[in-house]
Image: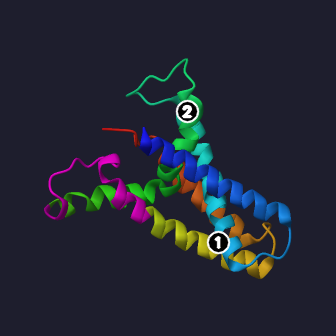
Amino acid sequence: MLFFIIHLMSFIVIFLASVLIFIRRKKHGLKANFLLGWAFQITLSLPAGIWQAVMGWPHINVSGSGKRLLIPFIGWPFNAGGFTLRYVLEASVPHLEWLVGHRSATVLSNMPYYGFLLLIQGSILAGLFAWRYRKKQTYKDWFVICMGGLFLVNSLANVRWFWAGN
């Protein structure tokens, strides 16, 4: 349960801070643009979470409950990581068993490692967004639009991944 609360709280904190920055509409510094880059990634990961909530997974049944509304917000780290982080995690976890002992290859049993990978990927993308947005001061930039499109494709390519368990 704590796991889901942490994901919801991180979503809320990043989003509220980004909304405050966006509302101020002043010239943003690099830190503010970096935070906007993370919010950009979280926002673009929500369509994959909505698809998971609407279509459901064959492994679980969440019909008739409010849990279905929370799936996009709880699953944002997994949907933001997309197919690229899923591939890296599944390819590298079996090789790391000697270091951490026997674990299953699920993402929840390897959450610190997955979180570190997400931090690296997300920071690189947020840094690129911050650099470009600071330079152009608009969301209508071809680089930002292409980056968002690639991020969305990466996220949607991962919607069938059952990150909530085996």
Tell me which residue sits at (62%, 44%) in the image. Answer: 47
Of the numbered discs 2 and 1, the one sitting upstream in the chain is 1
Q: Count the numbered circles shown.
A: 2
Give the crowd class for mark 2: few <14, some 14-19, many >=20 residues within 10 Å.
Answer: some
Say what amino acid the circle numbered 1 marks.
Phe
SS class, disc 1: helix
Apparent side of residue 73 relative to residue 117 in the rendered image (left or right)? right
Residue 62: x and y in percent read 48, 23
Q: Quadrant of residue 149?
A: bottom right
- Magenta span has 1? no
Say what amino acid the circle numbered 2 marks.
Ala
**Quadrant for the C terminus in the image:** top left
Q: Quadrant of residue 71?
A: top right
SS class, disc 2: helix
- Magenta span has 105? yes
Predominant SS of the magenta segment: helix
Tell me which residue sits at (49%, 48%) in the image. Answer: 6
- In the picture of the structure, the residue carrying the numbered disc 2 is 53
Magenta part of the chain? 98-117
**Quadrant for the N terminus in the image:** top left
Residue 159: x and y in percent read 49, 43
**Nearer the viewer's eye, disc 2 or disc 1?**
1
Q: Distance of mark 2 from mark 1, alpha carbons?
A: 29 Å
- Front residue of 9 and 62: 9
Above or below residue 4? Residue 92 is below
- In the picture of the structure, the residue carrying the numbered disc 1 is 34
Above or below residue 145? Residue 42 is above
Residue 127: numbered disc: none
As drawn, which residue projects farthest toward the bottom? 135
